[in-house]
């Protein structure tokens, strides 16, 4: 029997679909004969009492989830997400470099510093990449600090704003689509697949429209129904980052499947990501406490 600590924040349990997913983790652990305990920020000191740690709160090298990951690692405990994955996925410059080094297919991508945020460089990139470009601040999540620009003036305006957050920014060609594929990958193996259907008013999975938060609709499907190239590319992208749990966003284009980004701490909501993959919870539990990702015994 193992003891698993699940690190959460108050906001993690404020939404019913997230709370239900956490309860499904607990049921999966107990069915395997393990204990699962939820830990909040004031209880981080208790981590050494457990056999493994699962983080189900927003990750960032500057917040408490990173402290939880490092504390687990310092005590030799398996942890998802590990600190290396957090640092890579929370810095898009770092993440895209890893994908490029692994030859994972991506939209055309460049990293620019402040000297490049000028109209002439913008004109060059529009000529090379197309009439619309996507600018991203390195430390962004949930589609925040991601903007599409169509003119050199907008390129400079958005780019300079993002430089207040970082020394460099990411510029990519715009890849139009009505949805993004999301493939969950655990320890280099596909875990679940779904489509995030993008609202008509935007190109992003999540944004504020007329003062209201608008998010993509989640359409889940069995893994075997997903295009094999989508799953294969997602696994390659995840393996370029590490050996943990990742949510890989991809698009299908005329040039083939491209990886938009790799997320650590991917969303797992009850009746969404798990709809056709109810074994998500068991597989993660077994990976952490039983040293395998399948848990078939």
Image (cartoon, grey):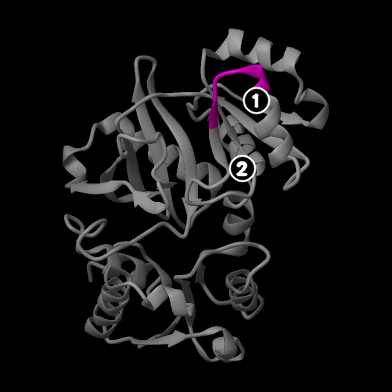
Q: Is residue 148 above or below residue 288?
A: above
Query: Dot 1 lies on which element?
Result: helix
Q: Position of residue 138 (x, y in %)?
A: 64, 44
Residue at x 41%, y 44% (from the top left corner): 248
User: Which residue is the site of mark 2?
Assistant: 92
**Residue extent of the magenta highlight:** 148-155
Q: Tell whether 127 sits left or right of 81.
A: right
Foreground pick, 197 / 213: 213
Image-quadrant location for residue 46: bottom right
Is residue 152 part of the magenta span, yes or no?
A: yes
Number of other residues with Cα within 10 Å of mark 2, as a class: few under 14, some 14 to 19, many 20 or more: many
Image-quadrant location for residue 113: top right
Residue at x 39%, y 44% (from the top left corner): 205
Can residue 133 be seen from the camera position used here? yes
Work out how far the residue at label 1 is from the one at label 2, CA to CA, in angstroms. Answer: 18 Å
Tell how many labels.
2
Q: Quadrant of the C terminus?
A: bottom left
Number of other residues with Cα within 10 Å of mark 1, as a class: few under 14, some 14 to 19, many 20 or more: many
Q: Position of residue 86 (x, y in %)?
A: 59, 58
Q: Mark 1 vs mark 2: give the one in front.
A: 1
User: Which residue is the site of mark 1?
Assistant: 155
Residue at x 22%, y 64% (from the top left corner): 279
């Amino acid at each position: 029997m193992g003891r698993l600590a699940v690190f959460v924040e108050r906001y993690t349990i404020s939404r019913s679909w997230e709370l239900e997913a956490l309860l499904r983790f607990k049921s999966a652990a107990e069915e395997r004969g393990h204990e699962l305990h939820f830990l909040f920020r004031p209880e981080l000191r208790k981590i050494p009492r457990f056999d493994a740690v699962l983080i189900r709160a927003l990750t960032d090298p500057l917040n408490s989830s990173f402290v939880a990951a490092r504390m687990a690692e310092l005590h030799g405990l398996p942890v998802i997400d590990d600190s290396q994955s957090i640092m890579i996925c929370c810095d898009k410059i770092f993440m895209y470099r890893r994908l490029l080094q692994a030859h994972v297919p991506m939209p055309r991508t460049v990293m620019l510093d402040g000297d490049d945020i000028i109209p002439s460089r913008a004109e060059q990139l529009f000529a090379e990449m197309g009439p619309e470009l996507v600018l991203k601040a390195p430390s962004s999540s949930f589609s925040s600090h991601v903007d599409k620009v169509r003119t050199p003036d907008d390129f400079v305006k958005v780019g300079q704003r993002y430089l207040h957050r970082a020394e460099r920014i990411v510029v990519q060609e715009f890849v139009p689509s009505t949805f993004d594929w999301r493939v969950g990958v655990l320890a280099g193996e596909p875990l679940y697949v779904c489509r995030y259907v993008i609202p008509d008013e935007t190109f992003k999975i999540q944004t504020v429209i007329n003062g209201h938060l608008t998010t993509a609709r989640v359409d889940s499907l069995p893994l075997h129904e997903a295009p094999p190239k989508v799953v294969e590319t997602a696994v390659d992208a995840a393996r370029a980052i590490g050996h943990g749990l990742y949510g890989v966003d991809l698009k299908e284009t005329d040039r083939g499947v491209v990886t938009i980004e790799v997320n650590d701490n991917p969303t797992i909501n009850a009746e969404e990501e798990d709809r056709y993959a109810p074994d998500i919870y068991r597989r993660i539990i077994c990976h952490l406490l039983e040293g395998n990702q399948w848990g078939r015994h």
